[in-house]
Amino acid sequence: MPNSSVPGQSSAGHTCAHGQKYEGMRMSESIHPIFEPANLSDQERSRLHNLEALVAAGIEPYPARVKRTHTVADARALFERGDAGEDAVTVTGRIKRMRIMGKMSFADLEDGTGSIQLVLRKDSLPANFYDDVWKKLIDLGDFVGATGPLVVTKTGELSVDVREVQFLSKALKPMPDKWHGVRDQEKRYRRRYVDLLANPPVRDIFRTRAVIVRALRDFLDGEGFLEVETPILQPLYGGAAARPFVTHHNQLHQDLYLRISFELYLKRLIVGGYDRVYEIGRDFRNEGVSFKHNPEFTQLEFYEAYADYQDVMRRTEEMVAHVARQVTGGTTITWQGHTVDLTPPWRRLPLREAILEATDIDYEAYPDAESLAAEMRRLGHDPDPRSNWGKLVDSLMAKHVEPHLIQPTFLTDYPLDVSPLAKGSPDDPRLVERFEGFMVGMEICNAFSELNDPIDQLRRFIDEAYRARHGDEEAHPVDEDYIEALSYGMPPTGGFGMGVDRLTMILTDTDTIREVILFPHLRTIREGGEEEEGAGEDVPSAQ
RNA sequence: GGCUCACUAGCUCAAUUGGCAGAGCAGCUGACUCUUAAUCAGCGGGUUCUAGGUUCAAGUCCUAGGUGAGUCACCA
């Protein structure tokens, strides 16, 4: 069926096949309750009525093809160059605002490149189109193509002086408030498309996120790193202290884990002979949700042979500074009122000193969980009695040090107990060569000189397995194949992991991870009472 | 999981001590050929998150539940 691109001239009263299609949706026996009039608001009914009226007038409300000559940005550029002349351009987009003034109207049309004003005059349009279609049947939020020469109005606004309108897509839902947009956080996250179409600054956040990811790749590619992809579904998880999601492969009759890190696979690649590898991808951790935790999040990890954690520290600050320059043009940023200077070099501070300074506790004087917990209680802290020594140290850091690290800081030289994959310090058997990077009170990265001694690594795994048997749900399982890989020899290697979402929070001045994830995890809304659960019969849950 | 707070028209928000549930935008009708949050006149629009309870009377008080936010616990 030919699409009538000049709707005003179509023969009225002719009903095409589409007419019956849409009328059917209004009948009580319609196939789904979504479009039943009883379930619609007055505004939705009005829009559905306008859709039917368009079809009755012979206008295809969802045509298959569009004839656009210029994006909004292109049209503006054309005019700026003075090349516009009196030739017509065709721009396409969503109608965001309308000002109808009798026989003349203004409308703001927006596409992905920007917004431009349309001028519609009754005299300049096909017969009856202005009164019968434009004023009556087109709603805010509809997509149209507008054709006409570029003009400047009396008030200086570049506009398309519209001679022809092509209808492109009908919006059946009313648009959010044109001034306030959508504010309700739950609505914004559950229906992100509404958030994006109504709140332009939100679109900018995800454009910036793309710039950040591209800048990370630029930087690492430029340093000779190879981008790789490793399994998300893994028979054995590892590389971080976290509980995994469990799933099941039906045909193989095998439980699989969604990865919690890329670490053990990327180091296998170092064994295989790639000296510099990285991966940017999704990790999944089955734990609490908060302003800085989403169950799935984007991680960058890189591994570099013949480097140690000091080398990685330097690379980290250079990489983050590079990204900041790509995003903001400089290395000083503002986050929630704090001025943060990302210019290398960043402050380095041994973890032991940081905790001593903040809490007056020198954890090395309390080498076991019992004595450290006792000292913590003596100073008024409330340690979790189930915690082992490493977790106590970590909790001291997380509670008393991390929140105060606004400027970028590397905490260095972590206890071996909490670092089962990191190489021991040659100077102190209780420490490993590890650092974590912090800024704006948040951890953003974690790195170490990788443990490449297969016998030492096996010993660490066995310790972890012991902890797992004694209730530590985040302890590492023994990965025998990884030990096998190390047994072929892995060069001294520096490894690094960073939360890309958190970096994005910092560079977009947002205070919750949900603002930088397009579709953050939210609980499914349960309707009223309890319904029987259909799923889950052959999906074992994590124990 | 504990505690605190929130949920009202399509959207943004009001509603006094428990006393007729309102406004702006959006919608509908009309006027208007240079507006840009257009303006002006008129009209319609509500399961006040859900289910109970107290009361002559509940958006408001009580109980339970849902969802979200914050916080604590947990979580590199």
Image (cartoon, rainbow, N blue to C red):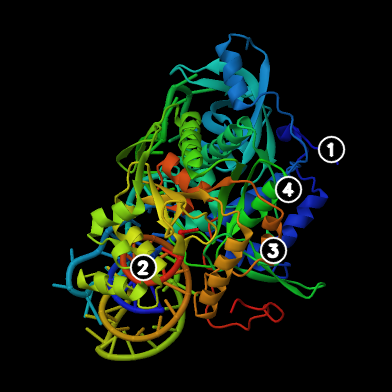
Left or right placement of residue A539 versus residue A95 in this view: right
- Percent from the top left, x then y, of residue B70? 34, 61
Please tell me whether mark 1 sits on a helix, a strand or a loop. loop
Residue A45 appears in the picture as rendered: no
Would you name the residue on which mark 2 appears?
A392
Mark positioned earlier in the residue sequence (1 or 2) = 1
Q: Nearer the viewer, mark 3 or mark 1?
A: 3
Mark positioned earlier in the residue sequence (4 or 1) = 1
Left or right placement of residue A332 versus residue A96 in this view: left
Residues under labels 3 and 4: Cα distance? 19 Å
Q: Neighbour class for label 4 at 10 Å: few (<14), some, many (≥20)? A: few
Q: Amino acid at mark 3?
A: Gln
Q: Amino acid at mark 4?
A: Gly
Would you name the residue on which mark 1 appears?
A2
Q: Neighbour class for label 3 at 10 Å: few (<14), some, many (≥20)? A: some
Residues under labels 3 and 2: Cα distance? 30 Å
User: Given contact means CB atoms under 8 Å apart, are the residues at marks 2 and 4 in contact?
Assistant: no
User: Given contact means CB atoms under 8 Å apart, are the residues at marks 3 and 4 in contact?
Assistant: no
Q: Nearer the viewer, mark 4 or mark 1?
A: 4
Q: Which chain contains the residue that carries disc 3?
A: A
Question: Quarter-wise, where is residue A103 in the image?
Answer: top right
Q: Amino acid at mark 2?
A: Leu
Please tell me whether mark 2 sits on a helix, a strand or a loop. helix
Q: Which chain contains the residue that carries disc 2?
A: A
